Image: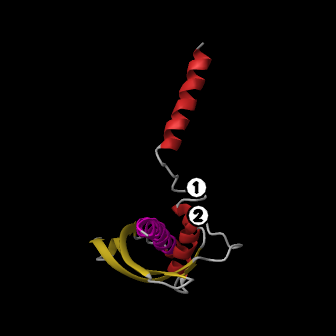
Amino acid sequence: MRGRVLSLSVVCGALLTSACGFTPMYGETGIGSNLSRIAVSAPDNRLGYRLREQLEDAFGWNGSAAPLYRLTTEVQQSRRPLGRRIDDTASRYELTVHAAWTLTPTAGGEPIKGEQTTVTTYAAADQPYAAIAAQQDGENRAAADLARLIRLDMMRALAGR
C-alpha cells in the first residue's frame, strides 16, 4: 500500500510540475543550452588562460557545435601588500582582479557588456617556490570566482532576451 501511495505522489508531482510551465535552466531548451555554444577569448597570459578555462568549464563548452555567441574578456589585476613583518616585508597580499566582458551574438545584434571584480588574499612565503605557488593559487581562485560571476551575469542577460 505504501508503494502505491509513493508512486501516486511521484506521478502527481510530475504532472503538477509539467503543468506549471517549468523549464529547467540547464535543460536542452533552457538557457544552459545556449551557454554551451559560447566561444571564449581571453588575454594571452596566465590569468587570462585560467579565466578562459574556468568559463569554458562553467558553460560546458561544446567545441563540435558552431558558436552562437563570442565572449571577449579583458582582465586587469593589482596586488597590494597587507600586514607587515618585523623586517618590513608583507605577510599577506590582496589580489584584486577586474574583468570587463562583452558577449556578442555571432549572427549579429546588440552585444551585452558587463564588468565584475573579485578580491582574494594569499599568504606571503619566505621560500621563492612557495611564494610563487601561493600567488598562482590566489590567481586560480580569482579566475574561478570571476567565471562564476560572469556566468551569472550572462544567464540573467540571456534570460531577459
- Which of the numbered marks, if any, corresponds to residue 121? none
Residue name at image x 32 percent, y 76 percent: 81
Mark 1, other Cα within 10 Å: few <14 / some 14–19 / many ≥20: few
Magenta segment includes 143:
yes
The magenta region covers: 131-160
Residue type at the position of mark 1: Gly
Q: Secondary structure at mark 2?
A: helix
Residue type at the position of mark 2: Ser
Tell me residue 68's x, y (percent).
58, 76
Q: Which residue is mark 2?
A: 33
Q: Nearer the viewer, residue 42 or 139?
A: 42
Magenta segment includes 9:
no
Tell me residue 136's x, y (percent).
50, 73
Q: Secondary structure at mark 1?
A: loop
| Above or below: residue 7 compared with residue 91 | above
Q: Nearer the viewer, residue 95 or 102?
A: 102
| Above or below: residue 120 compared with residue 77 | above
